[in-house]
Image (cartoon, rainbow, N blue to C red):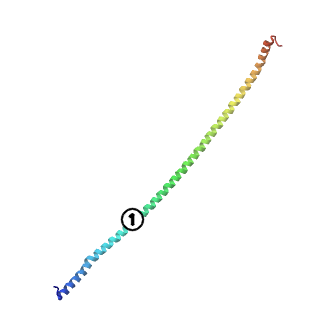
Amino acid sequence: MIEINASLFIQIFNFLLLMIALNFLLYRPIRSIIRERREKITGFENDIDQLAERAEDRLKEIETRLSEAKKEGFLKKDEIKEQGLEEEKKIVGGVSHEAEAYMERIKAQIIGEIGQARTALQSETEVFSRELAVKVLGRSLS
């Protein structure tokens, strides 16, 4: 059975003294270490969130730049294509002008040759017609 005497009060005093000593020597330092770790973890979590946001921002920026580069590439492609078409038109136009000029020279040459052939045939036609008339009539024409 428990007796209430002076030793009980000494035990309670010893217990309270031990609790105060443990509080100063053990519990407070442990609680401060736990608090510091919790603050570090919270800081790390905040840093992680900030880095994740930065990474997302950079990813969006990269995607934006990529889409701009694609648009720019398509525009340059269309521009080069248009330049090629213009160059093709110039070349085809030049060739067609050369072909037309060549055709005009050939036509002029043919017309000249036709004119020469007509004059040659006209002079020969008179001779042939006289010979034919002589043969048909059987007499000479004077």
In the rendered image of this protein, does residue 41 appear above or below residue 96?
A: below
In the rendered image of this protein, does residue 100 appear above or below residue 40?
A: above
Q: How many numbered marks appear?
A: 1
> The N terminus appears in which quarter of the rendering?
bottom left
Q: For this view, does 15 lie left or right of residue 55?
A: left
Residue 136 pos. (x, y %): 79, 13
Q: Residue at x 56, y 46 (%)?
A: 81
Q: Residue at x 63, y 37 (%)?
A: 95
Q: For this view, does 36 lie left or right of residue 130?
A: left
Residue 34 found in image quarter: bottom left
Along the viewing direction, whichever of 10 and 48 lies nearer the viewer: 10
Judged from the image, the secondary structure of the residue bearing numbered disc 1 is helix
Residue 127 found in image quarter: top right
Along the viewing direction, whichever of 125 and 116 lies nearer the viewer: 125
- Dot 1 amino acid type: Ile
Farthest residue in the bottom direction? 5
Q: For this view, does 134 lie left or right of residue 79?
A: right
Residue 65 pos. (x, y %): 49, 56
Q: Residue at x 68, y 32 (%)?
A: 105
- Please rate how many residues cluster around mark 1, counting C-alpha atoms within 10 Å: few if below 14, some from 14 to 19, many from 20: few
Residue 27 pos. (x, y %): 27, 76
Q: For this view, does 2 lie left or right of residue 120?
A: left
Q: Which residue is mark 1?
A: 48
Residue 141 found in image quarter: top right
